[in-house]
Image: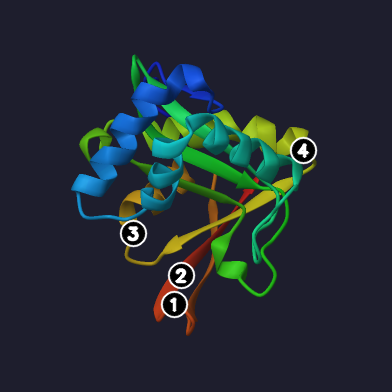
Amino acid sequence: MARRTGLRLVTLSPHYRRAWMRMANEWHRSGKDRYDKMLTTANVSFNSLCREFRNQEKGRKLQKGYVPCTWFWMKAGDRIVGRISVRHTAIRGRPWTGFIGYDVAPSARGKGYATEALRLVLPYAKKIGFRSIDITCTKNNRASAKVIKRNGGVLIKHQYVPQEKETFSFFTIKL
């Protein structure tokens, strides 16, 4: 069962600018470029970044290879500690991406935030029409596999993905 963390899922708005910038800068300092492009946009206009997320949710102005996707930010106290997103459709030709993606800032790992965020986002996935949700992680990502299993994920298969040069674990969660 998911540990209760006091976590809330929020959509990005100017109200969360400072907390989001802190999280994105933490990723940058850790040597991961996960949010660098978004950070560049946010430094110019945080409102523009918020608008990009709303457009992606509505399927407007999507970049090539992108699908409609809703982004939620994990808020714990006054901090944004990570994100979880739900793709509304599969990414053509990339089945290993699954429908849900998440990450937790390095300083916030091991506190149950990903498990709780996945638990909190599953009703949204059901609301937008999913009866079950496919979710993947690399086979060696034991922490992510635990998160998925704690939320009812059932392992379907392990499969090597040549494009990524890695083996992925494919799970499904009935909603």
Helix, strand or loop at label 1? It is loop
Identity of the residue drawn at 35% across and 23% down:
18
Helix, strand or loop at label 4? It is loop
Q: Which residue is mark 2?
A: 168
Identity of the residue drawn at 49% across and 82% down:
163
Could you classify mark 3 by the number of other residues whose Cα lies within 10 Å: few (under 14), some (14-19), or many (20 or more)?
Answer: few
Disc number for residue 73: none
Q: Nearer the viewer, residue 34 or 108?
A: 34
Amino acid under label 4?
Ile
Question: Which of the two discs, 4 and 3, labels the residue nearer the N terminus?
Answer: 4
Q: Which residue is mark 1?
A: 164
Amino acid under label 3?
Asn
Q: Nearer the viewer, residue 32 or 127?
A: 32
Q: Are the residues flagged by discs 2 and 1 in contact, CB closer than 8 Å?
A: yes
Identity of the residue drawn at 61% across and 41% down:
52
> x%, y% of residue 36?
36, 50
Question: Which of the two discs, 4 and 1, labels the residue nearer the N terminus?
Answer: 4
Rendered position, 137 above or below 151: below
Rendered position, 174 above or below 118: below
In the displayed structure image, the side of residue 136 where residue 69 appears, left or right: right
Disc number for residue 128: 4
Q: Give the mark toward the camera: 2 or 1.
A: 1
Amino acid under label 2?
Phe
